[in-house]
Amino acid sequence: MTGTNGGHYSSEPDDFTGLSHSNKPLPKVDVNSSSNGQRSVKIWLVILSGLLVSALAMALLGNTQKEVLESEVNVSLTGPASEDLEVTQGAAKNRVQEFPSCLKKIPPGVMEGRGLRSPRVSRGKAKGVSEKTNQLSYRRSRSPEFEWNEKQLAWQRTAFHFQPPQNWMNDPNGPLFYKGWYHIFYQYNPNAAVWGDIVWGHAVSRDLIKWLHLPAAMIADRWYDINGVWTGSATLLPDGQIIMLYSGSSNDSTQVQNLAYPADLSDPLLINWIKYPGNPILLPPPGIDPKDFRDPTTAWNTAGGKWRFAIGSKMNRTGISLVYETQDFKSFKLLDGVLHAVPATGMWECVDFYPVSMTEPNGMDTSVNGPHVKHVLKASLDEDRNDYYAIGRYDEEKGIWVPDNPENDVGIGLRYDYGKFYASKTFYDQEKRRRVLWGWITESDNEAADIRKGWASLQAIPRTVVYDQKTGTNLLQWPVEEVESLRTRSKNFINITVQAGSFLPLDVGSATELDIIAEFEIDLEALDKLSDFDEEYTCGTSSGANQRGALGPFGLLVLATDDFSEQTPVYFYITKGSDGNPRTFFCTDASRSSIADDVMDDISGSTVPVLRGEKFSLRILVDHSIIEAFAQGGRTGHHYGINRGMANKSGVKVMMDRNDLLHTLMMTGSST
Ligand code: DQQ
C-alpha cells in the first residue's frame, strides 16, 4: 500500500492497538565594467528585513582600524545611488506565542542562579551524554566573565528563530507534520537555563516560523527515563498512527529505547502522549556500553514489509549505527552487522538516515528506495560535537549503507554546517513534499550569561535539503520558503562602486533582522591568471578576514558596529592548487564578533564547489545575535556565528580584499 507520505509500504503492520488501550491508537541587472577600466568584481545585493533595514558600508578587510576609517572618506559612488534605494516597512515581532499558562503541565522555570559563575565541572558527560556545557568554561577558566548589562542581554534574544520562552533547549526531537500543523519537540530543561532535568518540550506551527508553545509532551516520570527523556524520532504509519521512538536514561543511567504514541489522534495538536506500557522496548545489546546506546531514527519500511530504524553507538572509538527490525513495533530484532561504521569517529549521537532523489526536486518519504535514490547518513560526533553527513547507497538486502566517496565518509568529510549546529534531524513534510532539516544551535558565550539571561540555545531556521544534482557530491540546504514571508521591506543596491581601500556607509536605518542575498562576479581572466598557489589554506587555520590572498577575502561584514569594534566577516577566499584549479573557501571570522573576551571567537568554514560560469553567491540571515549563512545556493558554508556583544549593532558592510584584481566593486540589484 501507499503510505500517507507518498513512500512505498509493501505491507501494513499489525494492529497496534494491542500496545495499550484498544481505543487509543499507537501508536540581477546589467553591470558594466568598472569606471576605471580595471578588472572588477560585481555584486548585487538585496537586503530584506522584517524590521528596520540597514546597510552601512563597503570596507576593506584586514586593515587596521585607522586604515579602515581613513578609507571611508575615499569611497566613490557611481551610478544610481541612494535615491534608487527602496525601503518598505513592516514589523515582525511577537512571532512566538506562548501557550495559555493554565494549560501548562510544568511550571515555568525560574532564572535560577543569577550571579552564579559558570560551573567548572562537566555537565552531561558524567550522565553518559555529550558534553553540554559551553567549553569556554574550561578553555578560559581564568578569564573574567564579561559584565553584560540587561539591555545587551535582551538584545541577544532572537526574533524569528525557534526558542522556548525561557530556559535550556538542546536537540530537536520527533519533528513531523500532522493535520495541518508542524510539530517540533525538543530536549528541554523546564527548571533552568543549563542542561539537565531533560523532558520533551513541544510546540506547533502552521508555517514553521510562528510557533505556539504547548505543555511538555513527555516528562521524566518512569524508571526507564527518570534521568532524562532523551532524543527520539517520529514515524508516521500508513494507517495514520504515529510512533515516537525515544531514548531514556534510566534510574541507573542505562540508555534504553522507549516508545510513545499520541493519546488522541483526532487532536491535531497532539498534546497528550502515552508511554507504551511495555517500555523499555530495547536494552543495550551485549558488547555495547550502557551509556553508548541512544537516539533512534525515524523507521523506514523495507520491500519485505518490515520496519527498520537505526541507533547510534560506538565500539572502542569506532562510531557505529545499529539497526533493529520489527513487524509490529512490539518485538524487535537486532540485525547482524551494522548499517555503517567509521573508525576513530567516536560515539555517534542522533544518527539520521534518509533518501534523496537524484532526479526530482522534491524530498522523499523516509521509506523510499530505488535506482534514482541516494541515501544520506548523518551522525553527530560526540567527540567534536559537529554534524557530519555523507551521501551513498543503501543496500536493503545486505542491510548496509556504502558511501559514494570513502574519503568523505561520515565523520571525516562533509558537515551540514561549519558553525554551531548539532544533533540535527530531518523529517519528510508530506504536505509540501520536501525534507526539512532541524538543527540545534548551541551557545558561544559563557554559561553564566545564559543563566543571567534565562535561556540558552535555539534551533536553526529549518532548511529544505535536496541532493545537489549539479555536483553530485553534496546536499543543498536552504531556509524553508516560509522565511520569505517575513520580508516586509526590501532594499536593493544598484551600481555602487567602491574603490579599493575604502568603504561606503549606506545608512538606511538600523536593523537586527535581515535576510541578505548577494552575488559576486569575478572576471574570469582574473581567475585564470591567479598565480598564487596555496595548498595549505583552510578557513580555520588562516588568520581570518585579515589574511590577504590574490582573490580574497571578499564578502560581507554583518552585525558590525559603526566603529568596527565588533564585526563578523562572512567571506569567500579563492586559492589555486598546484594542479592549477581554483579552490573556493567560504568562511566566517568570529574573532572580532564581540568585545567580550569570554565568547567563542572561531574562524571557521569549508571549501565550496563553484562551477565554471557560476557567480559567487551567498545568503545571510541575521537575527539579533546570530547569523546563518549559505553559499552557492546552500551547497555548503551555511555557517552559524553567534554574535554576542553590543546591543543594537546592525551594520552590513561589503568587504573586499585590496588586491588590484578586485579593485572595484559594483553593487547592483533590482526591486523585489
Ligand atoms: N542529547 C540527548 C541525547 C543525545 C544528545 C540528551 C545529543 O539523547 O545523544 O539531551 O546532544
Image (cartoon, rainbow, N blue to C red):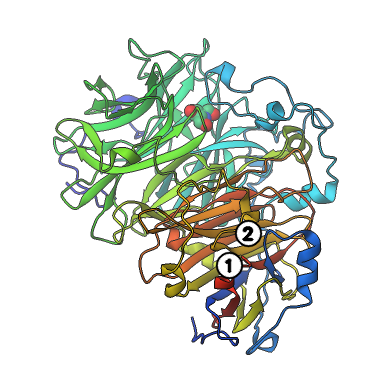
The residue shown at (50%, 15%) is 250
Residues marked 2 and 1 touching at CB (< 8 Å): yes
Residue 459 position, x and y percent, is: 56, 46
Q: Is residue 246 left or right of residue 155?
A: left
Compute the Cα span from label 2 to label 1: 8 Å
Question: Is residue 230 in view?
Answer: no
Looking at the image, is 147 positioned above or below residue 133? below
Dot 2 corresponds to which residue?
622
Residue 284 position, x and y percent, is: 37, 15
Closer to the chain start, of discs 2 and 1, is: 1
Residue 348 position, x and y percent, is: 42, 28
Nearest the camera: 366 or 83?
83
Report the number of numbered marks: 2
Residue 503 position, x and y percent, is: 71, 72
Secondary structure beneath dot 1 equals strand
Does the residue tagged 2 have its C-beta within 8 Å of any atom of ligand 1? Answer: no
Dot 1 corresponds to which residue?
516
Nearest the camera: 321 or 497?
497
